[in-house]
Image (spheres, rainbow, N blue to C red):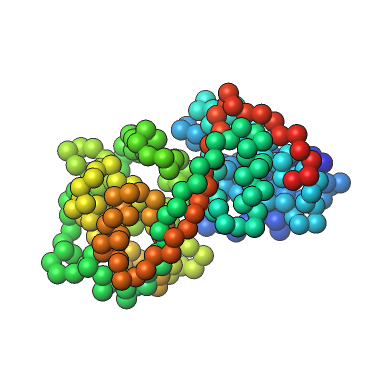
Amino acid sequence: MEIVLITQRNSEKFQEILPEYRGRIPSMLLGCEKDGIAAGTAGLEMTEDGCSLGWLWVDPEFRGGGMGGALLDAACREALERPAGRLTVTYPADKDWSAVMDYMLAVRGFSVMAHRYPTYRITKEQLLASPLLAGDEKKINPHVVPLSELERFRLQELLVECRLEREYLVSHAAFGWVDPERSMVLLKDGHVMGLALVRPMETEDSLCLDLLYLRTSDAREGILLLQQTALALLRHPAGLRELSFTCMEETGMRICSRLLGEQAAQWEEFCQGTLFAELYRPGRERHV
């Protein structure tokens, strides 16, 4: 078994077991080979504020031989050598493999917390009919601007605020996957007070609201952010068929419950694991 860095020179070997993704390729791709055969892959986003594990996958034919653990250890080493000295991973809590992931992370010293969030799937017609866009509230608000207009130093400010003030870690990686014209930022008195990150889904007419972050507890300001985001979604060049999102912020939950109450949310549980350099213990198990 050998862990290798996937580059242009050897990417063809791993192509069939890499996940499909939209947008840019992650910062680092790791591969696991067994007797020269591609057996598993892992994707990492390396950023100045920390690293995140995008996926960890081993071909079913090769599972049970420690390849998943070896890939995870390699990812940990790569991440913890960076200045931030931290690696995070977020995954559903109710998948068949979630218990295995819990164990693999615990062995290596990750701190894992479970969070339960409401998930919505909204069609264009439902969005148009929601209270969010009712009456005279379709006016453009000067305090809400597209992410594409936010200077880089403001992004850094936002990352620091998110890291200090909320449990759900926001990585700079998130900004590389989104639609910058339809992702919106709420500004007040020169400060970033909210963010709605929107990314494309597998089909061009489907979008996902990846993150709704609100530094303010004022629901009116949160509604302004959502209104402007909704208007931007409806102007999508391919047309909007469906919007899906999981609301991970308390103020955002209250707003969504108020505005989308008739469209019942499905509650989903996610686990978030965080590892710091000083807590890392290389995994020793061979059966994962």
The x, y position of residue 213, in whole percent, is 33, 47
The x, y position of residue 204, in whole percent, is 46, 67
Q: Examine the rendering and report whether any part of residue 232 can be seen.
A: no
The outermost residue toward the right is 35
* Side of 16 relative to 167 (left or right): right
Residue at point 62%, 52% (across, down): 98
Residue at point 29%, 46% (across, down): 214
Residue at point 61%, 32% (across, down): 109
The outermost residue toward the left is 136
Q: Is residue 87 above or below residue 250?
A: above
The x, y position of residue 5, in whole percent, is 69, 40
Q: Examine the rendering and report whether any part of residue 37 can be seen.
A: yes
* Side of 261 relative to 65 (left or right): left
**Residue 173 or residue 237, whichever sits in front:** 173
The outermost residue toward the top is 278
Q: Is residue 52 above or below residue 206?
A: above
**Residue 74 or residue 46, whichever sits in front:** 74
Total numbered circles:
0
The x, y position of residue 120, in whole percent, is 40, 64
* Side of 215 relative to 199 (left or right): left
Residue at point 30%, 66% (across, down): 260
The quadrant of the rendering that contains the N terminus is top right
* Side of 16 relative to 126 (left or right): right
The outermost residue toward the bottom is 125
